[in-house]
């Protein structure tokens, strides 16, 4: 039976009063994971490795002591192999957070993609995630790819700074990838901006949309309403080019016979008499040389 406004539901198992569940409790809050929360060390060792380019070797050697110190706080050991050109992170018996090894893996990935250490170390904090967006295979034309990638940075880096402010994420455009760090919601918006930019949608359209959304979020009256009527609608313009009028050639009459063979160069010389004149001149030259 359908419930009416006055009637009460027949099943009251899940509608009991919960005096402990008050409005001031934040159900989405992520509590910090402490060493007391785990009963014993991990049964097996987990490890991740990633390669880094040759030009990053000098920088990684300089910051590696700081990387080791930052990971030791979470009970993670790290190895820098300059011969193989790779970084490795492993769990130890001191590791207490099961998710710490995944955070350490993301950290060495960011370091390999030219993200500076002071920024990459923030990935170890709770609520910060990373996303590495591959953009190399979206556009085949090299010149077009470089132009669209430059749009993400903008003149003097203004577009990149605007995207970072609106999404609350850090963004690094390097080679065929875009490395991003920040909250999950911001990373989702940033990925959409980057992929649309490589598909020939300028980032300024998304920036305008995010600015309007940020202003609408400040108004408590509009929190439960649909915002589509406030957002700008950008339609694609397909302007058809005028077709060039080519004059029609008159149709030739069909004949089953092939066209007559054209006279060769020698035939033309024989016909004009130039062929015999050349022989006479050659004989004169021989007489003069003798």
Image (cartoon, rainbow, N blue to C red):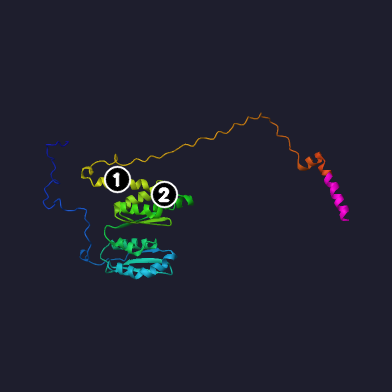
Disc number lying in front (2 or 1): 1
Question: Can residue 134 be seen?
Answer: no
Instruction: Single out the residue that lies furthest toward the top.
Output: 253
The residue beneath circle 2 is 198
Vertical placement of 153 versus 231: above or below? Answer: below
Disc 2 versus disc 1: distance between alpha carbons?
A: 23 Å
The residue beneath circle 1 is 212
Image position, residue 58 (x, y; %): 41, 68
Which quadrant of the figure contains the N terminus? Answer: top left
| Residues drawn in magenta | 277-290
Image position, residue 249 (x, y; %): 62, 31
**Within 10 angstroms of label 1, few (less than 14), some, or many (20 or more) residues?**
some
Q: Quadrant of residue 7?
A: top left
Q: Secondary structure at mark 1?
A: helix
Which quadrant of the figure contains the C terminus? Answer: bottom right
Image position, residue 152 (x, y; %): 39, 52
Q: Nearer the viewer, residue 285 or 250?
A: 285
Is 193 situated left or right of 1 in this image?
right
Label drawn at residue 91: none
Vertical placement of 143 versus 106: above or below? Answer: above
Q: Secondary structure at mark 2?
A: helix
Confirm whether the magenta stretch covers residue 80: no
Image position, residue 180 (x, y; %): 35, 56
* Dominant SS in magenta: helix
Identify the residue at image location x=33%, y=50%.
189
Question: Can residue 70 be seen?
Answer: yes
The image shows a total of numbered marks equal to: 2
């Amino acid at each position: 039976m359908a419930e009416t406004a006055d009637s009460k539901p027949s099943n009251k198992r899940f509608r009991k009063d919960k005096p402990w569940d008050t409005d001031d409790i934040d159900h989405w809050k992520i509590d910090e994971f402490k060493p007391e929360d785990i009963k014993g060390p991990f049964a097996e060792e987990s490890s991740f490795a990633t390669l880094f380019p040759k030009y990053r070797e000098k920088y990684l050697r300089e910051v590696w002591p700081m990387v080791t110190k930052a990971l030791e706080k979470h009970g993670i050991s790290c190895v820098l192999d300059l011969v193989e050109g790779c970084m490795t992170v492993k769990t130890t018996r001191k590791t207490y957070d099961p998710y710490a090894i995944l955070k350490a893996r993301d950290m060495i990935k960011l370091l390999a993609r030219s993200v500076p250490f002071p920024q990459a170390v923030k990935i170890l904090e709770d609520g910060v995630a990373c996303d590495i967006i591959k953009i190399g295979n979206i556009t085949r034309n090299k010149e077009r790819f470089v132009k669209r990638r430059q749009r993400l940075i903008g003149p003097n880096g203004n577009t990149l700074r605007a995207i970072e402010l609106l999404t609350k994420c850090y963004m690094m455009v390097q080679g065929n990838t875009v490395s991003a760090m920040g909250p999950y919601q911001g990373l989702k918006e940033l990925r959409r901006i980057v992929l649309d930019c490589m598909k020939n949608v300028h980032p300024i359209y998304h920036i305008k949309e995010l600015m309007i959304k940020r202003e609408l979020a400040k108004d408590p009256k509009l929190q439960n309403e649909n915002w589509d009527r406030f957002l700008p609608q950008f339609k694609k313009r397909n302007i058809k080019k005028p077709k060039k009028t080519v004059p029609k050639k008159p149709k030739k009459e069909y004949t089953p016979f092939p066209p007559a063979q054209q006279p060769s160069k020698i035939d033309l010389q024989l016909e004009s008499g130039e062929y015999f004149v050349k022989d006479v001149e050659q004989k004169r030259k021989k007489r003069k040389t003798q």
